Image (tube, rainbow, N blue to C red):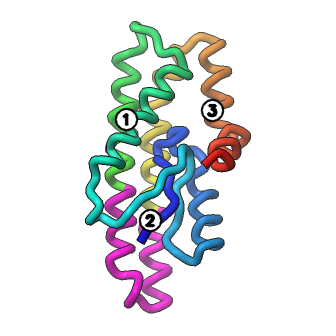
Amino acid sequence: MKLCIAIVTSVLAVGVADAQMSGAASSGSAPAQAGVSRTRQSSDSGAAPQAQEVEEHIKQLHRELQITPAEEAQWDTVAQTMRENAQNLDRAIDERDASIRTASAVDNLKSYADVVQAHAAAVKRLADSFSPLYSEMSEEQKKVADEIFSHREHSRHVAKN
């Protein structure tokens, strides 16, 4: 089963819950994750393409945020958090996918709650890892980051994909 997903971490996972809710409501399938959209196939398709998309997104954000050499160590922490968050969310969605066809309404709701909780935990981890980097950024970098993480930027990414 294909799901429209973006990487939590995509636009560092801000606004993911909104996209998950709208994706599930519009398709009747498992939730979508916001940010940079991608097609996510069931776990039998392999994790390599998904991991590659995470890496591409990390590189794109690195460029957009104009990370300086002095910020690299903090950026590496953010990037690793993005990788781990994507893996954790993929795992939660895979678990939901494995049982969705035979799940009762209650089980379906509980499995959806598990995905949403995994997402919420990912956003918290991302905020915690991004905060020290953000505090060291120049005012210009902060303006770019504010735009990337704003709802306006989220809407543009979802509309593009």
User: What residue occupies the far right of the structure in this picture?
Assistant: 152
What residue type is disc 3 on? Ile
What residue type is disc 2 on? Val
What residue type is disc 1 on? Glu
Q: Nearer the viewer, mark 3 or mark 1?
A: 1
Q: Which residues are magenta?
A: 89-116
Where 86 sits versus 17, above or below?
A: above
Relative image position of residue 138 (x, y in whole percent) = 59, 10
| Residue located beneath label 1 in the image | 55
Quarter of the rendering containing residue 26: bottom right
Q: Residue at x 38, y 90 (%)?
A: 102
The answer to whether mark 2 and mark 1 are in CB contact below 8 A is: no
| Residue located beneath label 2 in the image | 115
Query: Mark on residue 148?
Result: 3
Where 92 sits versus 138, above or below?
A: below
The answer to whether mark 3 and mark 2 are in CB contact below 8 A is: no
